[in-house]
Image: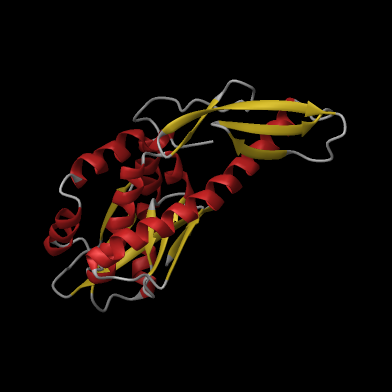
Amino acid sequence: MPSLVYGTTSIDYTIEYLENKTDISVTVEWLDGVNVRAPEGISEETLQQVLYKKAPWILRKWNEFSEINGDVPVKEFVSGEKFSYLGRQYRLKVFKREEAAKASLLYSQGKFMAEVPARFSSEETKEALRELFKTWYIKNGEKKLKERIELYGPKMMVTPSKSALKEQKMRWGTCTSTQAIYLNWRLVMAPMGILDYVLVHELAHIKHPNHSAEFWRFVASILPDYEQRKEWLRVNGPLLSL
């Protein structure tokens, strides 16, 4: 995926070249990230110059998404706090152990159970458990992702070359030119129907690499209520955070 470096920020984007287009247009969305449409034959130098000028607007637009639901609550990683998995809330119980050499996390009987060394400060506990939760979400989420691909792939008559959950700062999902599907690991916190929507969206790009009318008709044929799911993600996406 191409990217633009602006200051210390790397902005990933997808690009579509159109024969009859005369200018460069940019859209920014929570689901699709940054999308660029440009005339065929445009030079890379000209493209980068235009995108560099638009970078402040792109970043400002992106930051607006975090304001949709106000301030996102900061996780404290303390006993009694709730963490979402596939749309359901599960409480965390933290145990401080003198004999513990490092922090650990497991899910058991409807609860997240964590152990941390007694010597850990609150900040060290937060940092350690944040990474452990992320690892847990990715490991368990990828199992669900494979299950959902097995469900939707045959219906859509597509097969991704690869699939995985990964860190994506400005995208919910990606379908690469090699037909690999990558979803943002934070989607594992959302209800299954929302993860399904992003997956179907990306699988549809295997057949339709742009957002044409045919693309949206294809998505609607699989998920007739996709617009409601898309709106849920637009509004609640910023809350899917550790």
Residue at the extreme right of the image, as rendered: 99
Number of numbered discs present?
A: 0
Residue plotted at (83% across, 36% down): 100
The residue at the far front in this view is: 109
Residue at the image point whose x is 27% and y is 67% from the top? 154
Q: Quadrant of residue 86?
A: top left
Quadrant of the frame with the C terminus: top right
Residue 165: % across, % down:
48, 56
Q: Nearer the viewer, residue 183 or 191?
A: 191
Would residue 133 be seen by someone viewing this image from the given angle? yes
Query: Which color scheme did the rendering employ for the protein?
Result: secondary structure
Instruction: Return the x and y of residue 137 as percentages of the image width and height.
Output: 53, 45
Q: Is residue 213 above or below residue 91?
A: below
| Residue 112 in which image quadrant | top right
The N terminus is located in which quarter?
bottom left
Residue found at x 64% / y 22% = 79
Look at the image and tell me whether residue 37 can be seen: no
Position of residue 166 measured from the top left corner of the image (x, y, whole percent): 50, 55
- Image quadrant of residue 68? top left
Closer to the camera in the image, 45 or 20: 20
Q: Is residue 67 left or right of residue 118?
A: left
Q: Residue furthest top?
A: 80
Instruction: Measuring from the top left, give residue 93's x and y in whole percent.
Output: 64, 26
**Residue at 42% across, 45% down:** 187
Query: Does 109 sit above or below residue 22?
Result: above
